[in-house]
Image (cartoon, grey):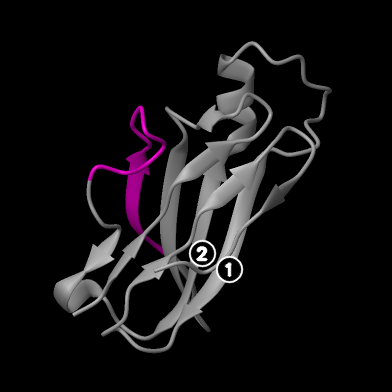
Amino acid sequence: MGKLSTHVLDTTQGKPGAGVRIDLYAVSDAGRTLLKSDTTNADGRCGAALLEGEAMKPGTYELVFGAGDYFAAQGVALPTPRFVDQVTIAFGIADPQQNYHVPLVVTPWSYSTYRGS
């Protein structure tokens, strides 16, 4: 079976985003269901896979990263309201046998992602 993982890279400071809250949701016609919440470690990663084994199923998901709170905790001067605050990445898992790595590369003014393995 595959797994779902993520990491956060703070390109403003050129370091891993440690202490970022991440919420994982399953998305269906009925709405969103929270599957897991975690906080990134000193390496900007979660301590374990967000999904793996029997929990790894085809479907639509959202990762919500607390980027604004992270930058505020870092002492970064942010406008009110924050330009980048809660970053939501919506993605699909088509083949649960594969690994899906969905990282966040972020600054207070921009973000990007890609599919890694």
Q: Is residue 8 left or right of residue 12?
A: left
The residue labelled by disc 1 is 90
Magenta region, residue range: 33-47
Q: Tag 1: residue type? A: Ala
Q: Tag 2: residue type? A: Glu
Q: Earlier in the sequence, mark 1 or mark 2?
A: 2
The residue labelled by disc 2 is 62
Q: Quadrant of residue 24?
A: bottom left
Residue positioned 76% across, 14% down in the render: 77
Residue positioned 22% across, 50% down in the render: 48
Q: In this orientation, which residue lies closer to the viewer: 11 or 82?
A: 11
Q: Quadrant of residue 67?
A: top right
How crowded pointer 1 is (Cα within 10 Å; few <14, some 14-19, many 20+) is rated as some
Instruction: Confirm or deny contact between disc 1 and disc 2 (CB under 8 A).
Output: yes
40 up-or-down from 74: above or below:
below
- Say if the magenta span includes residue 46: yes
- Indicate the position of residue 76 as horizontal and vertical percent values: 70, 16
- Say if the magenta span includes residue 116: no
107 up-or-down from 35: above or below:
above
Q: Quadrant of residue 69?
A: top right
- Indicate the position of residue 117 as horizontal and vertical percent values: 39, 69
Label 1 and label 2: CA atoms lie apart by 4 Å
Residue positioned 81% across, 36% down in the render: 83
